[in-house]
């Protein structure tokens, strides 16, 4: 059995290490590997004998899994209405507003794909727990497990400290994720601190267990306790614990620091109550001493500033409001919940935080558990934790085995992560939900050791064991295949998102091929995962954008072909809404298409989308635009909705101004919305100039913008776009030297902006500095090969250059031939 215990421990440590350094396990490619590993652990657990009969722990865990599984089972509408009236009501709105129009059968989960993924995570955690409880039944195997988990936590802490010491721009020295180096390999600092807290418990349990064994040996040999000898033997563990403590402090996670304090207090009280401290206390005192020294060496000012924010209500008011709103969702679904993993698809309609950020998690694992699994699921989880803690207390109090000391580390991990889960969501990450069950599994494992029950591997399993093995393998195989499809779909969707970002870049002019690539990637992702509501939404949104780009959508849909395309798009969006009836963006998109078709249903759909996603800036913008088109227009509502849209997403400002001026011809609201922002004031002036009839106002707005811009540039507070805008004003006023200098200043901070570089080319041309202008145009072509405006400028400059100093064409500048285009038209 020893080799099977080693295999289980190696698998668990590998899973935790892999998921930890793969950004906490959030990468889609990690999921199939986790599920396959869980299948192996489940098979080993099923064939391991000698474990105790099912008790409260195993029954609670099994029922918890069963509730999540039942949420995926289609139920008759009558049963569904009995268990979850709110869910039945939502389904009825897909039809004619009554239950007669709802589907005959439907699951309790609002969105089955997310519940399936969350169920897979729960099964992985259960397999880890069961494998440790049934196979790790010796001091040696417990030492292996604790050492492995502790090593992962120390390595993660060292990575974070190294990144900070080298002033890395982000995780793995990569600034593209937009997070600081203090989060280790995690995207969120709270998740990082929760993982380190859990592995700190493993290190603490390892230290106490080894210290107890050494103390017993010293007692038998009649040797007294020696602190120098203790530090020499366990110094590496103490230093590792101190490194983790420093990493938690420097992560700037208030929840992590609070978790450390709460867990340390509980463990100290428990050890003191059981009179287990003894000479070990002197060794433990070295941990805070080394930690304080490390903090002073690295710098603790940021930590103290972060802790000081606890006195500020604004620092945690949003999280409190988020938890309250999440609990309200749970109160609407008290029996069956909304479905495990469905928070991000149900919660937005109840969100009262006035934030544009989509709350994928509730930042409170307890409130989210109640929301998604109802009161029965929350009660079972509470029973599981309480029974586990009671068993831990009983074993540590009554057992005489040295391995019982490992459970003090387990207690630390449970209390620290439990306290942090009040304000964080780390238990949803693979790295954390594999580590905590692995440690918790030591409670029944140590109980089995104390009872003298040694597991044996069953060479010839009976029918019931074979049934469990077959079920585990079948479930692991199916879930692994689904996870693999998720991974493939996500890869293609990431290609679509990258193409979309390219199309919407300010310095990029999209081509027909760009839209072909965008649609091809999104269609492939949707074909792989046809039940993914987000893929369905974005595919139809991309189709609508590609169909209407550069044209008046209202005019296009009036043609027979355009009307047919719009009708088909509306039908596909309506079909996609059935995948997740609470996904607001689909309603907004459908209403937007209907609005161009002048369909009266548009206003109702747009309002439904806004109500389901009040924090979505696109929903507010479309609703505000619809209010402008009502008969009669609702000025006040339109102003409120459009202002909210701009507040949530500032780039919507230009579209908002254009809609308002074209609809009402009013100047006051756009100027007030600009709020003395020079860039916005210029945008207001540009729109007013395009509309016409506002010449006096345009001059006043431009003068105000110029004054504010020059003040900001002089103070060094202007952004590259503001500097470029100031350069444009200088060029318009005839101050060409100043304009050229400002354009170069903006390009020094944004080298790849071809539009600014082309504007600099024009300024240099007016200054008759043709060589410099030619070089700038050539740089545009190097940055964006085949760009027509740059080619035209180079040809013009070739003609403007003096005859005695001709400008030489370069390979980047194709030479036109008579009757031929310089650049072939895009394919398709």
Image (tube, rainbow, N blue to C red):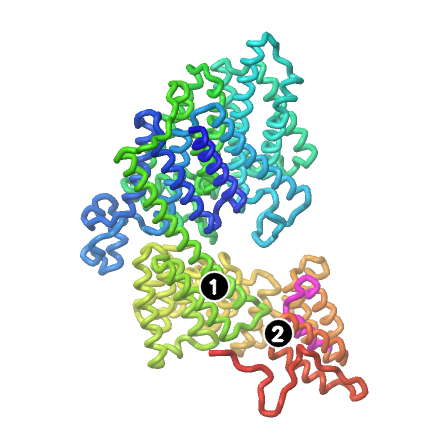
Please state the total of marks drawn on the protein image: 2
Residue annotated with mark 1: 496
Q: Position of residue 699 (x, y in %)?
A: 62, 73
At mark 1, the secondary structure is: helix
Q: Position of residue 301 (x, y in %)?
A: 66, 37
Label ID, residue 785: 2
Residue 368 can be seen in this image: no
Query: Could you tell me what secondary structure mostly forms the magenta stretch?
Result: helix
Q: Position of residue 341 (x, y in %)?
A: 38, 46
Tell me the residue at 60%/77% (across/down): 786
Q: Nearer the viewer, residue 431 or 295?
A: 431
Q: Position of residue 449 (x, y in %)?
A: 41, 21
Crowd tier of the residue under label 2, counting other residues whose Cα lies within 10 Å: few below 14, some 14–19, many 20 or above: some
For the record, the magenta segment spans 746-764
Q: Nearer the viewer, residue 698 or 415?
A: 415
Crowd tier of the residue under label 1, counting other residues whose Cα lies within 10 Å: few below 14, some 14–19, many 20 or above: many
If the image is split into quadrants, where does the N terminus sit? top left
Residue 13 can be seen in this image: yes
State the image quarter where residue 690 is shown: bottom right
Give the mark, 1 or 2, whose residue is nearer the N terminus. 1
In the displayed structure image, the side of residue 714 where residue 273 appears, left or right: left
């Amino acid at each position: 059995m020893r080799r099977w215990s080693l295999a289980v421990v190696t698998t668990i440590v590998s899973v935790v290490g892999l998921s930890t350094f793969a950004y906490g396990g959030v990468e889609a490619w990690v999921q199939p590997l986790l599920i396959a590993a869980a299948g192996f652990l489940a098979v080993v657990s099923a064939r391991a004998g000698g474990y105790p009969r099912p008790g409260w722990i195993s029954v609670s865990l099994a029922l918890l899994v069963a509730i999540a599984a039942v949420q995926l089972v289609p139920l008759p509408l009558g049963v569904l209405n009995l268990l979850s009236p709110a869910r039945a009501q939502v389904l009825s709105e897909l039809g004619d507003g009554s239950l007669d129009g709802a589907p005959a059968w439907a699951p309790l989960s609002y969105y089955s794909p997310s519940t399936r993924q969350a169920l897979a995570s729960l099964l992985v955690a259960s397999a880890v727990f069961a494998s440790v409880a049934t196979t790790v039944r010796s001091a040696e195997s417990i030492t292996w497990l604790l050492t492995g988990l502790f090593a992962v936590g120390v390595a993660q802490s060292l990575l974070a400290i190294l990144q900070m010491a080298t002033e890395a721009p982000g995780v793995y020295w990569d600034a593209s994720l937009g997070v600081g180096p203090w989060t280790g390999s995690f995207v969120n600092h709270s998740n990082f601190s929760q993982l380190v807290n859990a592995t700190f418990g493993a290190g603490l349990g390892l230290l106490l267990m080894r210290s107890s064994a050494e103390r017993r040996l010293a007692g038998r040999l009649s040797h007294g306790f020696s602190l120098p000898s203790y530090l020499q033997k366990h110094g590496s563990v103490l230093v590792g614990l101190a490194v983790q403590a420093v990493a938690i402090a420097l992560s700037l996670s208030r929840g992590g620091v609070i978790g450390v304090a709460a867990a340390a207090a509980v463990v100290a009280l428990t050890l003191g109550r059981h009179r287990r401290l003894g000479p070990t206390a002197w060794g433990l005192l070295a941990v805070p001493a080394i930690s304080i020294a490390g903090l002073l060496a690295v710098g603790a000012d940021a930590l103290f500033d972060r802790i000081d924010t606890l006195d500020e209500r604004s620092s945690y008011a949003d999280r409190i409001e988020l938890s309250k709103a999440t609990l309200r969702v749970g109160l609407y679904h008290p029996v069956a919940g909304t479905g495990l993993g469905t928070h991000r698809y149900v919660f937005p309609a109840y969100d009262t935080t006035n934030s544009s950020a989509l709350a994928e998690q509730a930042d409170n694992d307890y409130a989210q558990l109640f929301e998604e699994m109802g009161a029965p699921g929350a009660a079972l989880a509470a029973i599981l934790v309480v029974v586990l803690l009671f068993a831990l207390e009983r074993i540590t109090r009554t057992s005489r085995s040295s391995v019982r000391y490992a459970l003090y580390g387990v207690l630390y991990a449970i209390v620290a992560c439990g306290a942090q889960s009040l304000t964080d969501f780390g238990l949803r990450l693979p790295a954390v939900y594999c580590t905590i069950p692995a440690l918790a599994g030591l409670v029944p494992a140590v109980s089995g050791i104390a009872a003298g029950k040694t597991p044996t591997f069953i060479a010839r399993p009976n029918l019931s064991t074979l049934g469990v093995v077959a079920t585990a393998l079948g479930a692991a195989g199916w879930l692994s295949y689904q996870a693999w499809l998720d991974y493939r779909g996500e890869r293609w969707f990431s290609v679509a998102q990258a193409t979309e970002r390219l199309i919407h870049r300010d310095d990029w002019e999209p081509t027909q091929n760009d839209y072909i690539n965008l649609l091809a990637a999104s269609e492939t992702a949707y074909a792989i995962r046809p039940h993914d509501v987000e893929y369905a939404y974005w595919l139809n949104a991309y189709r609508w954008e590609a169909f209407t780009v550069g044209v008046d959508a209202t005019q296009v849909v009036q043609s027979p072909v355009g009307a047919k395309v719009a009708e088909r798009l509306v039908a596909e969006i309506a079909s996609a809404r059935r995948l997740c009836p609470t996904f607001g963006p689909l309603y907004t998109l459908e209403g937007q298409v209907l609005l161009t078709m002048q369909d009266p249903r548009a206003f109702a759909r747009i309002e439904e989308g806004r109500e389901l996603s009040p924090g979505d800036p696109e929903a507010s913008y479309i609703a505000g635009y619809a209010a402008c088109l009502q008969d009669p227009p609702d000025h006040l509502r339109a102003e409120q909705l459009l202002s909210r849209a701009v507040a949530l997403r500032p780039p919507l400002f230009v579209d908002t101004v254009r809609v308002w001026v074209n609809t009402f011809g009013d100047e006051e609201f756009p100027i007030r919305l600009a709020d003395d922002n020079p860039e916005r004031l210029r945008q207001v002036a540009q729109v007013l100039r395009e509309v016409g009839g506002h010449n006096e106002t345009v001059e006043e707005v431009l003068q105000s913008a110029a004054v504010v811009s020059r003040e900001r540039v002089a103070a060094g507070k202007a952004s590259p776009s503001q500097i470029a805008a100031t350069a444009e004003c200088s060029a318009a006023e005839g101050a060409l030297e100043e304009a050229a200098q400002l354009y170069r200043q903006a390009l020094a901070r944004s080298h790849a902006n071809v539009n600014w570089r082309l504007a600099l080319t024009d300024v240099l041309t007016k200054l008759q500095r043709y060589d410099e202008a030619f070089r700038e145009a050539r740089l545009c072509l190097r940055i964006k090969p085949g760009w027509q405006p740059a080619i035209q400028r180079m040809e013009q400059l070739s003609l403007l250059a003096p005859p005695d100093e001709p400008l030489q064409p370069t390979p980047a500048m194709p030479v036109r031939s008579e009757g031929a285009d310089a650049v072939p038209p895009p394919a398709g």
